[in-house]
Image: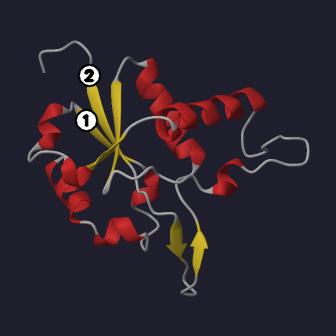
Amino acid sequence: MSTSTRKVLFVMSEAAQIVGKDGKSREAGYWLEEFAIPYQMMKASGWHVDIATPLGEKPTADPASFAVDNDGKCHLWPDDKTFRTALATKESAIDNGQVLSLRNLPDRFFTAYDGVFFSRWLLPHGRSHSVQTDSEYTFAISCG
């Protein structure tokens, strides 16, 4: 690339439910730290980060990943400042940011990026609707 700013496509799932081994659906989504930490690291390193999902819908955070107790503390995080920074990152990048659609990206879109990052939420949970049924993920993985 000729520009000095490196670009990465951060691919996430927009699925808001997951089917368990028992066949029942439950509310789900990406785990906050699995988005916020790599996103913050990329931005701190000077990367331009574009977020994309199969349909361009905003990804849903798993509510369990930022649940707070009666005192407003989330005990999944090492300290309150780190937790609040992750929430602010989610709000600015996803809630109020632009999410691209993999379907609307031009052919060979990956050549516009120096890297493609796949959120962990995409791959290990097997039964997420948008991962198993969306050919754009397969295309991006095979071309990236």
Q: Specify whether 99 is left or right of 31.
A: left
Specify the amino acid type for callout 1. Gly
Residue under label 1, please give it: 115
Q: Specify whether 124 is left or right of 63.
A: left
- The image shows residue 53 at horizontal and vertical percentages of 34, 52
Specify the amino acid type for callout 2. Arg
Residue under label 2, please give it: 6
Q: In this view, does 111 lie above or below 69?
A: above
Q: In this view, does 19 lie above or below 104?
A: below
Q: In the rendered structure, find residue 70 and report the number of the disc placed on it.
A: none
Q: Specify whether 7 is left or right of 111.
A: right
* Residue with the most extreme top position: 4
The residue lying at 12 percent from left, 15 percent from top is 2
Local secondary structure at mark 2: loop
* Residue with the most extreme left position: 107
Asked which quadrant contains residue 20, the reply is bottom right
Q: Specify whether 81 is left or right of 110.
A: right
* Image coloring type: secondary structure
Q: Distance between the residues labelled 2 and 1?
A: 8 Å
Local secondary structure at mark 1: strand
Quarter of the picture containing the N terminus is top left
- The image shows residue 96 at horizontal and vertical percentages of 50, 35
- The image shows residue 13 at horizontal and vertical percentages of 41, 56
Q: Give the mark, 2 or 1, whose residue is nearer the N terminus.
A: 2
Q: Are marks 2 and 1 in contact (CB under 8 Å)?
A: yes
The residue lying at 18 percent from left, 14 percent from top is 3
* Residue with the most extreme right position: 70
Mark 2 closeness class: few <14, some 14–19, many ≥20 residues within 10 Å: some
The residue lying at 37 percent from left, 17 percent from top is 46
The residue lying at 68 percent from left, 57 percent from top is 64
Asked which quadrant contains residue 55, the reply is bottom left
